[in-house]
Image (spheres, grey):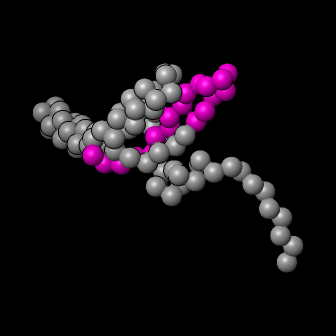
Amino acid sequence: MKKLVLSLMAVCMTAVMFTSCDPDKPHCWEMTWKTNNTTVTNYVYCSKNDINTKVDELAEQLGVKVTKKRAGNLSEADCLAKNLPDIDIDIDL
């Protein structure tokens, strides 16, 4: 029984590693940096390999530290929509 449980745990952990750590699978990423005492946040939808390149390029261009973190399991459209300003529109029908 103990061997069965350990085998199942190993299979599950391997499956999680291969599905969630695929460096070519795109995800929503939040990039943050400070400029002129203002914190700037930008959301991009790309792979882990691409986000590292984007962070390095942006840091070099701006001369600031750029941090990144996963922004959840958002679709590409929802991820990019986070960059849009919040606008309240009242429509009377």
Residue 64 horizontal/vertical position (percent): 51, 22
Residue sitting farthest toward the right: 92
Quick check: can you spot residue 33? yes
Residue drawn at 51 percent across, 58 percent down? 77
Q: Is residue 29 magenta?
A: yes
Residue drawn at (30%, 38%), measured in percent from left and top? 49
The residue shown at (60%, 33%) is: 40
Q: Quadrant of residue 8?
A: top left
Magenta region, mostly helix, strand or loop? strand
**Left or right side of 63 for 54:** left
In this view, 84 is above or below 22: below
In the rendered view, tell whether residue 59 sits above or below residue 43.
above
Residue 88 on the magenta segment = no
Q: Position of residue 45 (x, y in %)?
A: 43, 48
- Camera-side residue of 93 and 55: 55
Q: Residue furthest front?
A: 61
Point out residue 30 in the picture as x, y percentages from the top left corner: 50, 37
Left or right for 2, reference 72: left
Q: Nearer the viewer, residue 10 or 59?
A: 59
Q: Is residue 22 left or right of residue 92?
A: left
Q: Residue furthest left?
A: 3
Mark yes or no: residue 66 visible: no
Q: Which residues are magenta?
A: 24-41
Q: Is residue 50 above or below residue 93?
A: above
